[in-house]
Image: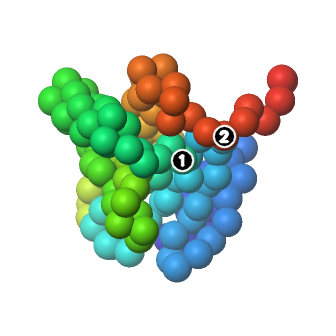
Amino acid sequence: MSPARLERLLTGHDLRFGAEDGQLIVPTLNALYFWNLENPNILQVRAQWRGRAEDSDSFEALVEAVARCNSTRSGPKAYLLPFQDGTSYGLSAECNVITSAGLTQEQMDTFCETSLEMIMSFFTELETLNPQMVTWQDGGAG
């Protein structure tokens, strides 16, 4: 999987992105999506949700969300993300596809769409159940 092929895929889906540390980064209102090509046998899309757990109730809500996601959904895989301050946590979710045998364009498109849909659905559920952790503002009406 080449970076140029992934860039064409993201551009074809009208996704704005930047590049940093060997990853393509797609910012959205509630998350940052990282497309990782470091492993030549796996394409990974990982998202870091913008919400933060800064107290015990919010931390417990994230723990429950991760457990619910990983036990009831086929994807994404969710996990807690400790921040460097050592007192707050975030949440990440990821989807992976094996690329060692190559991927057709249709497989790439399907992985892109399915991964984003699964992660976005999980984050939407999380935000609905935990509105106190949504601290960002809507970018405006469309």
The residue tagged 2 is: 136
Q: Is residue 79 visible?
A: yes
Q: Residue furthest bottom?
A: 21
Point 15% across, 30% down: residue: 71
**SS at circle 2:** loop
Quadrant of the snapshot with the C terminus: top right
The residue tagged 1 is: 50
Q: Are marks 2 and 1 in contact (CB under 8 Å)?
A: yes
**In terms of depth relative to the viewer, which is nearer, 126 or 14?**
126
Q: Is residue 138 above or below residue 17?
A: above
Point 24% across, 32% down: residue: 64
Q: Give the CA distance from mark 2 to mark 1.
A: 8 Å
Residue type of the residue flagged with mark 1: Arg
**Disc marking residue 23:** none
Q: Is residue 45 above or below residue 28?
A: below
Q: Is residue 44 above or below residue 62?
A: below
Point 67% across, 59% down: residue: 17
Relative side of 78 to 48, left or right: left
Residue 92, position as x, y percentages in the image: 38, 50
Residue 45, position as x, y percentages in the image: 42, 53
Q: Residue furthest left?
A: 71
Quadrant of the snapshot with the N terminus: bottom left
Residue type of the residue flagged with mark 2: Trp
Residue 106, position as x, y percentages in the image: 47, 40
Number of other residues with Cα within 10 Å of mark 2, as a class: few under 14, some 14 to 19, many 20 or more: few
Relative side of 46 to 73, left or right: right
Relative side of 57 to 45, left or right: left
